[in-house]
Structure formats: structure tokens, C-alpha cells
Amino acid sequence: MWSTTTATRIASVPPHELALSSKELPNLRSNYGNNVHPSSAGWMRPTALTTPLEEIRKRFEVDGYVWIKRLIPREDVYDMREHYFRQFAHTGILLPNTSPRDGIFDSASNPLIHQGIGGAPEQAALVLLDAAHTTPEYRAFVKHPNLRSFIRDFMGWKEEVMVERAMLRHNCPHSLSTGIHYDQYFLRAGKAEFLTGWVPIGDCSADGGGLMYLENSTTLGKGMEDEFMHMAKNLSHEERNNAFNKYMNKDGFLCHDAEEFRRAQAKESSWLVGDYEAGDVVFHNPYMIHAATKNEDKFGRIRLASDLRFYEKGAALDERWMKLWRHDDGL
């Protein structure tokens, strides 16, 4: 387990930020394949909102991510969770006599019928997913002043631009979700670097479908992208920037077996996870390799989160992403 190692690696962190490292890690896996070996899993480093900005920036540079605790008020997050699941309540996704605010899955239903983005949603669900991305409540949520002001301060930007193609992803217990990837190859047409913000919309346990990060994987991600772009050098500009071109996997992901991928690509690294709380936000760089854990939450909670990407205003962003998400947009 990582408890001793984690304490050694980040001994300068205040004691209250080490709380997660004393807990036993759950079994982790991605969509398919083996569980991550216990010796190859660890806890992410949480960062209090009161941490000095220079320390936050240092952690981001070293770790490739920074997990900010309680950035958005908890009730604001749960208001968004309730709004989302009210739109899907008639589909039978929720446990009868429970609140959409809780988002508890009805285990009597087939989870594969209720998949979100990253799985294989049925046609009727795609219509609902398209609509969910356009509601005033969601568009207001992604502009939350606490989120936006932190990004400007953290990045040192006078003004930020969020790509319009923000995404809402729900992941029922035992369904399919996001495979292993890094974000850059989906936004290749932009020349400037961007910042990803991953916002869990509700509490999300380490084995509840939240993100796990491959430790120290930024260099690996950059190397993979260089190799992909080299192989694609003779393709048209449009095809070269396509995350689904002939040199990429059909579904755009690197792999769906976290343990197999780690053994093949990063034997010395661990998969890092967290017990996320409503209000937390994780920021990561474009090359940090990550995936969703299989949702095996013991309370039956549906994992809901939003993926947001930000550029500095005036930067050479990926214009393809400046439109609202639709299931058939090809990106």
C-alpha cells in the first residue's frame, strides 16, 4: 500500500491533507480486464484552496494535475446534480422513491441501457444527452464565479475562454465509461496549450467511476502524441488532427485495461485515485494520462461529472470545439 510511501514523498504537506493516504485503497479497474495490482495504486494528493498559488502551481508542474478541495459550494454542485437527473428520471435510471439529487441507480435495471458519454448510449438517451448540454442551468454552472476566478488566478490569465464543447458524463454502476487517454489528441487543431478542469457533480468514491491518473505520465503522453503525429504526417491536415484517424484506436482511447496499460507503458508508475467530494475540481495538463474507474460504488451512486477545457483569451484554440457538444459532432 501507499500510506508510508505517500507520507515520505509529500512530507511537507500539512497533516490534514494526508488524510486520504491512511485509508485502504479499494480494488480498481477500468472498463475491462484486470484489477490494478494493489502495489500499483495510490492516493492522489489533495490541495486545500487556502494553499499559496505558487505551491499550487508547483504541484501542477510536478504532478501533472492538482486536486483542489471545495472550490465550488457543495449545494451549488448538488443543485446541478438534481437538475441533470430530473431530465432522466422518466427513463427508469433512478431507484424508485429516491431523489434525483442523490442520483441512486436502480439496480433492477440493466446499466448498459442507461449509459452516458464514454459508453454506448441508446438512441433515445442520445436525444436527452444532447438536450442536457444546452440547458441554462448547465451553461450557468460551468461559468461558476468560484471556478472561473480560480482559473484566472492559477494560470495568471487576465481572461479565460472555455471551449463551448463542455461535456456531462454520467456513469451508472457496472456500466462502461471513459477509457484510457490524454486530452491533447482530441484537441489537436489548437496550437496553444489548454487546461482541463474535471468537476465531479456529487460525491464520488475512489471506486465510484471517478478519474484515476497514471502517475508521472506527462512525458509518456507527450511521447505518444509525437509518435502519433509522426505516423500521420502524410495525412491531410483534417485527418491528422482527427482523434479517430487510421493510426488511432477506433473509439479514440489508448486502452480499456488499466493494469495492462501500466505494465506495458509505465511499469514504475501507479494509478492514482481520490475520494472526491462535491465542490472539488481536478485540473490537469493536456498530456496527463487518465481514465475513469469502473463504477462499483457501494451505495449505488451514479457518477456524474463535467469535463471543461480552458484557454487564455486570444490563444490559438481548437475552433472545432467552439460549439456545444452533440453526440454526432464527430469529435
Image: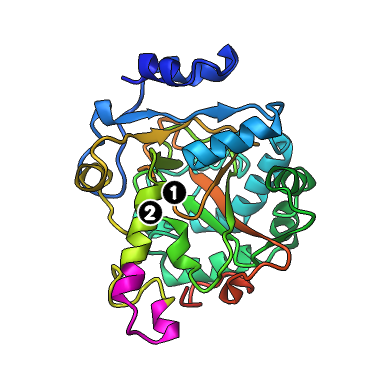
In the depicted structure, whether residue 320 falls above or below residue 314: below
Q: Which residues are magenta?
A: 228-240
**Amino acid marked by disc 1:** Met
Q: Is residue 21 left or right of residue 47?
A: left
Report the residue at 41% width, 76% height from top: 242
**Amino acid marked by disc 2:** Gly
- Residue holding disc 2: 221
Is 276 in front, or is 120? 276
- Percent coordinates x, y for residue 177 in the rendering: 39, 53
CA–CA distance between discs 1 and 2? 6 Å
Label 2: element kind: helix
> Is residue 84 visible in the rendered structure shown here?
yes
Q: Residue furthest bottom?
A: 236
> Is residue 289 visible in the rendered structure shown here?
no
- Percent coordinates x, y for residue 295 in the rendering: 39, 41
Residue 30: which quarter of the image? top left
Label 1: element kind: loop
- Percent coordinates x, y for residue 149 in the rendering: 77, 46
Report the residue at 55% width, 34% height from top: 59
Q: Is residue 44 left or right of residue 200?
A: left
The 10 Å Cα crowd at callout 2, few under 14, some 14 to 19, many 20 or more, is many
Is 318 in front, or is 250? 318
Q: Is residue 242 left or right of residue 314?
A: left
Is 98 in front, or is 214? 214
- Percent coordinates x, y for residue 36 in the rendering: 26, 36
Report the residue at 55% width, 16% height from top: 12
**Dot placed on the residue nearer the N-terminal end, 1 or 2:** 2
Q: Confirm or deny contact between disc 1 and disc 2 (CB under 8 A).
A: yes
Is 235 contained in the magenta span? yes
Is 15 contained in the magenta span? no
Mark on residue 207? none
Mark on residue 288? 1
